[in-house]
Image: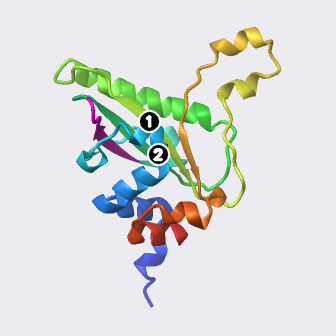
Amino acid sequence: MAKSSITNISHDTFMKSILSDRGAAISFLNGFLPEAITSHLNLTAFTYANKSYISDTLKERFADMVFDIPLKETDDQVQVSVLLELKSHKDRYVGFQIMEYLAAGYRHQLKSFKRNQKRLKLIIPVIYYHGKEKWKTNKNASLFIHLPKDFHSLVPEYDQVFIDLKKMGSEELERLDNSLLLTAIRI
């Protein structure tokens, strides 16, 4: 008997499929991005960026979906890159992997700069983690606490949106206001 193709669908493929639905994507972005960020975004006018910044070294760890989202106040846009964590385990070095991802994204934009893009789009990294272990991401400087504090300013730092489904309660998930997305996340 042939195996069902449904059992062969990976979690990242499943989530990418769900986020391909505009309503689910808007609900995801609105529900998981901080309100201080979403208050500036015109989420209903987003477009799917037909690109990925995943390098060969990151492919076994992440999949991504990139959204171009206009700001409400200006003609500028930001890119929200949802990184779907594939291996479902915590990693204390994820900050450096995300740094590689961000560098690839900005390099791609700089190549476009000469042709048609006037300004760089801020890339907002979102890590979507669905593993069983509790995971709290740390700043990159935490890996160098053995060095004098004078060196810490030389460590590249940035903020990221970290979504740990393990830490989310039912009330938080109910805010998603999209039954397709809510069902997918609970699965």
The amino acid at mark 1 is Ile
In the image, taking residue 148 as reference, residue 123 lies left or right, namely left
Please indicate whether residue 80 sits to the left or right of residue 85 in the image. Answer: left
Residue 67 within the segment the image draws in magenta:
yes
- Which of pointers 2 and 1 indicates the residue nearer the eye? 2
Q: Which residues are magenta?
A: 65-73
Q: Residue at label 2?
A: 33
Q: Residues within 10 Å of mark 1 (few under 14, many from 20)?
A: many
Q: Dot 1 corresponds to which residue?
A: 124
Instruction: Please name the residue shown 49% across and 43% down the image.
Output: 34
Give the x, y percent position of residue 58. 51, 41
Q: Secondary structure at mark 1?
A: strand
Disc 2 to disc 1, how far (Cα)?
Answer: 10 Å
Look at the magenta stretch and give its main secondary structure: strand
Q: Is residue 7 above or below residue 17?
A: below
Query: Where residue 178 sits in the image (x, y, percent)?
Result: 39, 67
Q: Farthest residue to the bottom: give it.
A: 1
Tag 2 and tag 1, C-beta contact below 8 Å: yes
Q: Name which residue lies at 20% across and 17% down.
A: 114
60 with respect to 22 (left or right): right
Query: Residue 73's x, y, as percent?
Result: 27, 31
Instruction: Give the secondary structure at mark 2.
Output: loop
- Can residue 160 be seen from the camera position used here? yes
User: If you read the primary sequence from the N terminus, does the residue marked by circle 2 or circle 1 appear first?
Assistant: 2
Location of the N terminus (image quadrant)? bottom left
Q: Is residue 72 above or below residue 23?
A: above
